[in-house]
Amino acid sequence: MLDPLRTVSKTGEVTDQERPSPPRRERRRKTWGAQRNPGQRLAFDAAAGLLLGACLSAWAVSIVAAYRERGQPAPPSAPGAARPANLPDRPPSLAGTVGASLTDPRANSTAYLDDAAMRALVQDLRGESGKLKAVIRAPNADLADEADPTLSATFEGTSGQEVTSSKLAAPADPGIYKLAVQLGKISKPVEDLRVITMVPFAQKKNDRIGLYYLGSWPYESGGKPRSASYANPSGFIEVTRENKGTAVSEHFKLGDFLTKDQYDVWPKYLLLEPKLLDKLELTVAELEKEGHRVDHVFVMSGFRTPRYNKGGGNTGGRASLSRHMYGDASDVYVDNDRDGQPDDLNGDGKVDTRDAKVFADAAEKVEREYPALVGGIGIYKACCGHGPFTHIDTRGYRARWYGEGAG
């Protein structure tokens, strides 16, 4: 384009002329790609794409895990959000808990072993009821079914000795320990929970351990058990005068389940199945839900050694394969006033088998809701110096009866 140029002639007239526009300065800036060959540029683009894809994938997985931890459906656009309805919920994981903290505006930037993560880690240790206070394991056995390999543990014994483990596993030496969970240099104690390492069954010699007589289990000398639940025990809890008051759940302690014999012999040895504790606690919760006050549950009979089951106390009504010998059975009744006798649960002014049935009916409801705790429920009438009571066990299959005697 030409720009007009105004000039004055010799006669004084003003005229317009056109002049050429000055040439534009050539731009010499060049892009990055023009300085390199196409092969280099392609390699850079590919590497950048892979890095971006990895970041997006990690972000999406953390969000999906966070939503699952909170019990909310993941966004439809999130990878892995769709999940068949008939599959069980996945147990909480440390990665999921951390992911939840990343999407929670209230969380701080270092919430890698915070209270929420700790609750997720010990949730299964407290059972279905959430009221267990003891984890009972063989030496060196994992504390959780799927222990996170990034976690370790520190244990403190009753005498103050400290034991460390490179993973979440019970100490090698039998005893009762406090637990602290570690992630790197971060350590958090698990309050109100004890880890109990059992004495191996192999330490039983000549039907006893030390001075405490146990006897022989039904298939110890040979034969095939009817099921795995009737096999020889894997080990025993060592109970002393000092630790017998250790709480194993909200309403029960170790000493509640001891065989009622050899009173002056210590230590004693005990079998106690955590599923039984869970079933008892859930039954108590059901009774309270129905309006019954439950401050104290008396264990009339818990673990019975084979020696005692065969010939100790009143043997009427005892089975040769009694579940009491396996630590997953108990004869119980509500005794809020702690007078040693059952309470009037149904409020009819008297204590009889109808009160025991109230306890049994509550246990029945628990079994329907928690099939993994299925077992025996028996109702016994007053006999031989004791009042009516309810037998509850977790043998693994359903059994119901009315009985007399010791249960």
Image (cartoon, rainbow, N blue to C red):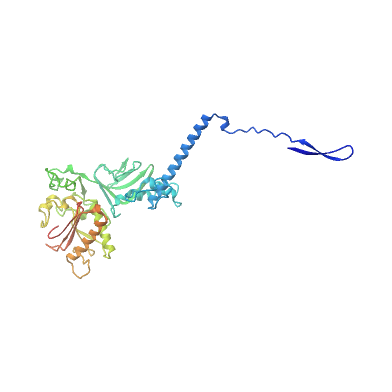
User: Looking at the figure, which quarter contains the N terminus?
Assistant: top right
Which residue lies at the image location 57% right of the left edge and 30% below the top edge?
35
What x and y, as percent, mark residue 321?
13, 51
Count all numbered tags in the image, as a single digit: 0
Could you tell me if residue 252 is visible in this image? no
| Outermost residue, right side | 11
Lateral position of residue 47 relative to residue 154, left or right? right
Q: Residue at x 23, y 60 (%)?
A: 297
- Residue 338 rendering spot, x and y as whole percentages: 22, 63
Q: Is residue 197 above or below residue 341?
A: above
Q: Camera-side residue: 303 or 162?
A: 303
Left or right of 29, for residue 172: left
Locate residue 72 relative to residue 144 in the image: left or right. right
Q: Nearer the viewer, residue 98 or 206?
A: 98
Q: Which image quadrant: the C terminus?
A: bottom left
The residue that appears at 21% across and 55% down in the rendered structure is 256
Q: Does the rendering let one see residue 238?
A: yes
In this orientation, which residue lies closer to the viewer: 334 or 370? 370
Q: Position of residue 55 (x, y in %)?
A: 45, 41
Along the viewing direction, whichever of 27 and 394 lies nearer the viewer: 27
Would you identify the image quadrant in which residue 170 lies? Answer: top left
Measuring from the top left, give residue 229's x and y in whole percent: 18, 48
When asked about the image quadrant of residue 364, the answer is bottom left
